[in-house]
Image (tube, helix red, strand yellow):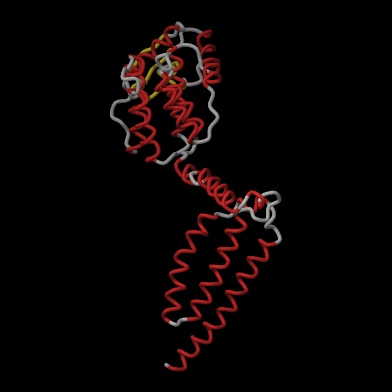
Amino acid sequence: MDFFQKAVLVLAFLSIGFSLTEVYLTVNQIWKRKHERIVAESISVTANLVSLFPGFIFALNFLLQGEYIGLIDTTLFGGLSLFYILVGMSIWVEGERKKGLLTLIKQTLNLERKEARDLAKSFFKPSGAKKIINIFAQVAMIDEVINPREKKFIESFANNWNINFSWENFRKNSTAGASVNLMSLRQDIADYLATSPPQKQVSEIKDIITALVNIDEEVSEKERLIMGELDGLLSEYINQQSNAARYHVIVVPQNERQVQVIMTSLPELTRYEVGEGFAYNSGPFYSKEYADLICDHYRSLNLFSIVTLTIPS
């Protein structure tokens, strides 16, 4: 046992050499670049200040216990932290030292405070964030009026996710016609779900859309209609279970001209064989009211359309 303890003690003394080598090599790499601003800004002064406190406690404990190997090792890395702090304060960056020590400390901490939320934001920024902001804007525009609360609510997400969103550009790119806007909104959400986002993220977006619709304390008929459809679409994805009621819109062209209209202007319609001919299907939809709206849209184009719970064969 004595031999083992002596062997460990020798190895501990040798480890000081490894620690000293590590500190030297680290300082050597930084020393050649300490005057570069980008290097200074890449070092967290706050993190190194925080590391000094436990390091001081450990060093004091080693001193009181007479464990000088641990004291030397802790002191070496404490010195490395001090070096990092000086570099991070831009002491060696040209033109910075003349500002004074207190000014440099304040300047560095302010910069870190501004950047401290960047990593956290990246955790909470959802995949397809730009598309999500566009979806929020479409929801707000369903009643064709942008309430200041809706605008501020959406802009808070765009700013937090570092997305440059312009209401002017959004209005320019909006499709004319209320029913077409509703179709576009549903399709955008379906496209977003097709990217397989996390269910928790979709659940949060569902709650945000609900809050957005109710934020002006008045739910319009159009908002109520689209929410009935979106609730079914999002809930099915979140629960990973098919909803029982699904409505289809069946379009039966009466002549070749109508076939051409469908093929060139209505890509959402899917052709299928029926009896001795063919028809087109749109859906499935989760809300009877929404399916009726889509059906009315097709009828406005002089297309024979009906709403069914099953696809006629």
Task: Estimate the x, y position of residue 270 in percent, counting from the top left.
Answer: 46, 22
Depth check, front residue: 81 or 164:
81
Depth check, front residue: 193 or 47:
47
Q: Residue at x 71, y 51 (%)?
A: 94
Residue that sits furthest to the bottom in the current view: 2
Task: Estimate the x, y position of residue 211 in percent, counting from the top left.
Answer: 34, 27
Task: Estimate the x, y position of residue 45 in percent, counting from the top left.
Answer: 54, 55
Q: Residue at x 44, y 73 (%)?
A: 60
| In the image, residue 62 above or below residue 241 | below
Q: How many marks?
A: 0
Depth check, front residue: 93 or 168:
93
Residue that sits furthest to the left in the current view: 244
Task: Estimate the x, y position of residue 165 in percent, counting from the top left.
Answer: 53, 27
| In the image, residue 251 above or below residue 42 | above
- The C terminus, quarter of image: top left
- The N terminus, quarter of image: bottom left
Q: Residue at x 44, y 94 (%)?
A: 2
| In the image, residue 301 above or below residue 54 | above
- The image quadrant of residue 186 is top left
